[in-house]
Image (spheres, rainbow, N blue to C red):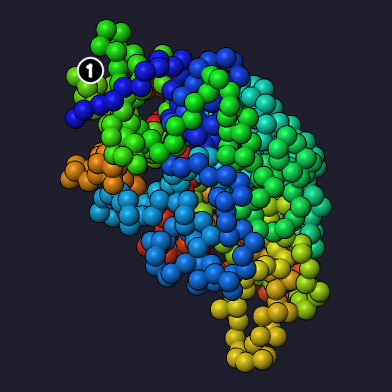
Amino acid sequence: MQKKKTSRVYDAIIVGSGAAGGIAAHVLVNKGLNVLLLEIGPKWDRGTIFHTEHSWPYEMPYHGLGRPGQYDGLWKVNAYTEHLYVHPRIDRYATAPGTDFHWTRIHAVGGRTNTWARVSLRMAEWDLKPKSMQDGAGEDWPISYSDLAPYYDKAEDMLGVFGTREGLAVLPDGNYHAPTPPARCGEVMLMKGGRKIGIPVIPVRKAILLKNRDNRSACHYCGNCDSGCAPGSRFSSLDAIIPQLLGRKNFTLRTQAAVHRVMLDPKTGKARGVEFIDTRNKLTYEARARVVVLGAGAMESTRILLNSKSREWPTGLANSSGVLGHYVMDNFKSGFVSGWLPSLKATEIFNDDGAGGGHVYIPRHTNFKGGRKSTVLRGWQFQPGSGSGSFPGYSKRLEGFGSDFKKEVREMNPARISLAGFGECLPYFDNYCEIDPDGLKDRYGIPQLRFHAQWHDNEKKMADLMYDSAEEILRRRRRGQSVHAQHSASAGRRYSRSRHRTHGRRSEKFGPQ
């Protein structure tokens, strides 16, 4: 294969422009290093990346949800965002028998910072030391909270996180530019219900500006957060980082560059650059640097390392332990319970969408000092939702027909309330990814991943407990509370429908090896 070499030798090559790569570029460029940032997707601008931001569901095909079955269960992909996500049928990856794993990918400058919910939380000391401080499972991280705290301060300042200081040991306070906007009606009721049973419901912490800063404007509560943010109030690498770097003499952004291998110096054994395919002309290029930073996401960075085989690294770069690709983890979603607040039924509908959705958050409340005891290891948290919405998805659960049915749908809209649970998955060696042994390749000819991943007993039991906990919180809100328990698409009582989901946590065991 003929390769074209870039003429310049950079101080650093960074692969990926999202949460990891974007921040790395910001730090290194501002330290004076000459940086090449490689991104597999195109660069959008703020005005076109979400070109349907203010389109109503009734203006979109299939009410914005997309053709049924088109996205193979990737819940964040719809008619508003399909131009960003990698379509699972166009660029397939492999799964082993018995595995139902969803790998969510965005190929664009900014990566998945373009679509995340912006909830921004700190890990506590006991999160970093689970083996010694919690339950003996897993491994302790080789760093402590005191090591991370000053970097949390810097990151929260850059992102523009709002929040309040609550003094909870389980959820350390942060460096906030503004307090969380006031809770809406349903959230106030939820906070009262939580207090009755000793479960804290606190103001949420999100990376959304409530004050103008740089080239980003304060949130104006338009309520279209899931389909874009023209003012750039929500943090993304595309809006907050890349614009500050473009035009700098020591920064080069190259888009549509599919990196597939890290190259090593045969004399030193250290990285000397990367190989990538230009997705437009399909030619292979070689870029050189003193340092290579892989920030392409947990799974994609792992794929690059596994594909970087050599005589010294026959099973992939930095894989002498054989652990690379193992311990695939995710915070699984389950316990989605929705209900109605009788006192808010048929009240006036107005824009209470808020800043990025919900204004409250329910932190983990099990298996720690001062918290509830549970029959499973670790715990879970809830992200509530309430109030009117643009699409009445709840209507399918209402009985009736004709004008009376439509009246009921309208009256229920401001009374909605829901809890979405997110649980912690334990680390398992047998949850892993590998280069597909059957030779599957992506559309650029790069060997693709094969996933082996299943929920274990602890996660299955936790899913049930999350439902029970959500129902308890809603029912204690008020006597006679109407609650409907709805299975989420990602985990639940029917484990045949369970999914390993989208956040894609670390795929190496971070600890002693």
Q: Is residue 57 above or below residue 457?
A: below
Q: Secondary structure at mark 1?
A: loop
- The image quadrant that residue 467 belongs to is bottom right
Can residue 297 be seen at all in this image of the molecule? yes
Residue 158: x, y in percent? Answer: 67, 31
x and y percentages locating residue 220 in the rendered image: 76, 52
Q: Is residue 91 left or right of residue 170?
A: left
Q: Is residue 383 above or below residue 276?
A: below
Residue type marked 1: Glu
Q: Residue at the spot x=57%, y=39% of the render?
A: 238
Q: Residues within 10 Å of mark 1 (few under 14, many from 20)?
A: few
The quadrant of the picture occupied by the N terminus is top left
Indicate the position of residue 206 as horizontal and vertical percent values.
68, 44
Residue occupying the point 67% across, 41% down: 207
Residue in the picture at 28% in, 47% down: 443
Q: Which residue is mark 1?
A: 312
Judging depth in this view, the residue of 284 and 18 nearest the camera is 284
Q: Name which residue lies at 78% across and 40% down.
A: 212
In the rendered view of the protein, which quadrant contains the C terminus? Answer: top left
Counting from the top left corner in percent of width and height, residue 277 is at 31, 35
> Can residue 373 be seen at all in this image of the molecule?
no
Which image quarter: residue 474? bottom right
Most extreme residue toward the top, as rendered?
Answer: 267
Q: Vertical placement of 400 versus 334: above or below? A: below
Q: Nearer the viewer, residue 503 or 498?
A: 503
Q: How many marks?
A: 1
Q: Which of these two is toward me, 166 or 293?
A: 293
